Image (cartoon, rainbow, N blue to C red):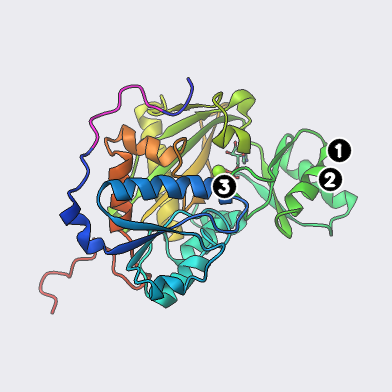
Amino acid sequence: MSAPAPSAPPAAVPAAAPADVRPLGKVAVLLGGTSAEREVSLMSGNGVLAALRSQGVDAHPFDPAGRDLGELTREGFSRAFIALHGRHGEDGTVQGALELLGIPYTGSGVMASAIALDKVMTKRVWLAEGLPTPRWAVLEAGRQSRSDLRAVPDRLGLPLIVKPPREGSSIGVTKVLGYSQMQDAVSLAARFDPDVLCEEFIDGSELTCAVIGEGSAARALPVVRIEAPAGNYDYEHKYFSEDTGYRCPAGLSAADEAEVQRLTLAAYRTLGCRGWGRADLMQRASDGRLFLLEMNTSPGMTGHSLVPMAARAAGISYEALCLELLRSAALDSTPPPAAAPAPGAA
Ligand SMILES: Nc1ncnc2c1ncn2[C@@H]1O[C@H](COP(=O)(O)OP(=O)(O)O)[C@@H](O)[C@H]1O
Ligand SMILES: [Mg+2]
């Protein structure tokens, strides 16, 4: 099946009346930016902008690539929707700047954003909490000897995956089939990061699961299955190909669907995420075991994107999703909505 419409979408939630959105004030949709995922972010941001405006939100595009974030204050913005991906957008830096400016923003705070952008740090946290993630090794780019390079497939087996720890959209990712390909794969990944993540290859199906909310109020959306030609879910197949299939519902057994959602929620909470996020997972064909690959804290919001697809399957329109995320905009110091005062508390 070709992307991205689920077969029988439930009735969409109607858009809010303009009066409801007035308290949201003047909203900046941060889009573009300077990362390698700039083009995707422009697509995401323009989609969000149109959706918010269609519901009467006073939303404006703001591209931090050419502007000082301080202008947000000078121009009277009261909250920000972050539709940036990757570095200087999804990695805690823009979140930190907005903290200093006192402008509530969508998505995770400074620490969770910074950890989640780094796949190695994320795996360390997950491992410490007993959450399943493929076995891995880290190489320091440019400093490894031939025997260091050989040691990785010796340990992780072949094929294996080599990727830059802080990039996204499959940029710099190689599936290494033999020892002789290690050097080129590491050199490619090293164009993006000073260290390189090598990961055990999980042969199986690719799943992704979105979360909306925070803490105990966080909820997982229906799981999406990704079917890329020959299992090759690269940049081209992510954003431009008509050949990549997306299935939502994913066709999992009820038990597997629940397990993917449970793991995703645990992975999200363990990292301290809020607002929304999307975990990428693999399910191994040989034994059905699930492995967490990464947590995206500012997932794509393009027409092909997976969170809007999962939301639709849960009866939430793209417009309603954008509005819900905007309403959840917060600062690190903002208490979560579920944190009601204990009975009898002063
Ligand atoms: N350990 C792995 N085993 C199998 N496939 C993988 C593995 N790691 C990554 N991939 C493939 O590469 C794609 C990109 O990897 P991912 O870790 O999600 O990084 P990003 O999406 O940030 O580029 C995945 O969607 C999947 O198709
Ligand atoms: Mg991914």
Q: Amino acid at mark 3?
A: Glu
- Mark 3–mark 2 Cα distance, whole angstroms, equals 29 Å
First in sequence: mark 3 or mark 2?
A: 3
First in sequence: mark 1 or mark 3?
A: 3
Q: Amino acid at mark 1?
A: Ser
Q: Are marks 3 and 2 in contact (CB under 8 Å)?
A: no
The image position of residue 6, as x and y in percent, is 37, 26
- For the question of whether residue 132 can be seen, the reply is no
- Dot 1 crowding, Cα within 10 Å, few <14, some 14–19, many 20+: few
- For the question of whether residue 324 can be seen, the reply is yes
Q: Secondary structure at mark 1?
A: helix
Q: Secondary structure at mark 2?
A: helix
Q: Which mark is residue 82?
A: none
Determine the residue located farthest toward the top in the rendered image: 1
93 or 20: nearer the viewer:
20
56 or 124: nearer the viewer:
56
Q: Residue at x 49, y 50 (%)?
A: 296
Q: Which mark is residue 39?
A: 3
Q: Residue at x 50, y 60 (%)?
A: 63
- Dot 3 crowding, Cα within 10 Å, few <14, some 14–19, many 20+: some
- Mark 1–mark 3 Cα distance, whole angstroms, equals 33 Å
Q: Are marks 1 and 3 in contact (CB under 8 Å)?
A: no
Query: Which stretch appears magenta?
Result: 5-12
Q: Residue at x 26, y 35 (%)?
A: 315
Q: Nearer the viewer, mark 1 or mark 3?
A: 3
Quarter-wise, where is residue 232 in the image?
A: top right
Q: Which mark is residue 183?
A: 2
Q: Which mark is residue 180?
A: 1
Q: Nearer the viewer, mark 3 or mark 2?
A: 3
